Image: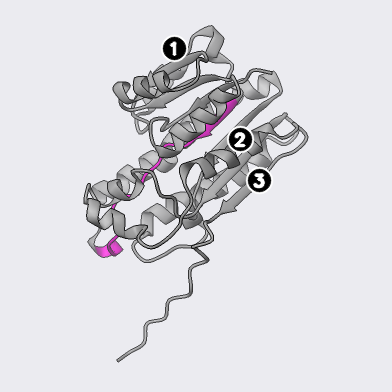
Amino acid sequence: MTRTVLITGASGGFGRAIAGRFARLGDRLILAGRTPERLEALATSLPPVPVHLAAFDIRDRGAIETAVSALPPEFAGVDVLVNNAGLALGAGPAQQASLDDWEQMIDTNTKGLVVMTRLLLPGMIARGRGHIINIGSVAGNWPYPGGHVYCATKAFVRQFSLALRADVLGTGVRVTNIEPGMVAGTDFSLVRYQGDAEKAAKVYANTTPLIPEDVAESVLWCAGLPERVNINSIELMGTTQAFSPFAIHRTP
């Protein structure tokens, strides 16, 4: 069955890879992001499938509501929602962090995700099927110095996903949280370090991390399983990464 798939943050590294995988299966795509030009470039690079572009800021509830209400009839019945839009800003200690950065992470990583979910969930329940796939992070399970609000937003995504799964029991709607570790080949670190390419590159120096296609493969696997199967969460890391050790400060 051809599905209708809505991907937020579609023009980013994960979004592009996820869109490409669904397109190769022949699914209809709703590509959401802030920049029309980047969405158009992505659409032209995909296999020829029906595509609807929705350019808006995921932090703006009114803009999300307008975009969802304006979906053409052939795209209105969303089968798979991939809440992919997200970012990290800053890596210093909390006492030095920017409140503007904190607010942007909260609004993007949590508020935008829940608004999009709330708008599309009733339709899924009415049709008796659907799948909400949230892109979380290992940061939601394994906090680290400098992670503060980013880690907290991803912990929210994890708990929201699990609670949502409990709420939709018996409706035919599935909920999955995908929690990647270090992934190269995206703008994640470049955004985090405000365009400092040298700092961003050091994050991945002398490692073999995951790539966006690995995350996309996890999304496709979860979405492609029989409807009787719900994958609650997947935590994936490259073999170059492991769990954070406990930090201990020792007095000199």
**What kind of residue is marked 2?**
Leu
**What kind of residue is marked 1?**
Ala
Choose the circle earlier in sequence order: 1 or 3: 1
The circle on residue 232 is 3
Q: Helix or strand or loop: what does disc 3 sit on?
A: loop
In the rendered image, which residue does mark 2 sit on? 220
* Label 1 close to label 2 by CB (< 8 Å): no
Q: Is residue 177 magenta?
A: no
Q: Position of residue 42 (x, y in %)?
A: 39, 24
In the rendered image, which residue does mark 1 sit on? 70
The residue stretch that appears in magenta = 80-95
Q: Is residue 126 left or right of residue 75?
A: right
User: What whole-number distance in Å separates the C-alpha atoms at marks 2 and 3?
Assistant: 14 Å
Viewport quadrant of the N terminus:
top right
Q: Position of residue 114 (x, y in %)?
A: 49, 36
- For residue 124, which quarter of the picture? top right
Q: Position of residue 66 (x, y in %)?
A: 40, 17
- For residue 204, which quarter of the picture? bottom left
**What kind of residue is marked 3?**
Asn
Q: Helix or strand or loop: what does disc 1 sit on?
A: loop
Q: Is residue 184 left or right of residue 89?
A: right
Circle 3 packing at 10 Å, graded few (<14), some (14-19), many (20+), is some
- At horizontal 42% and vertical 30% (from top left) the residue drawn is 10
Label 2 vs label 3, nearer the camera: 2
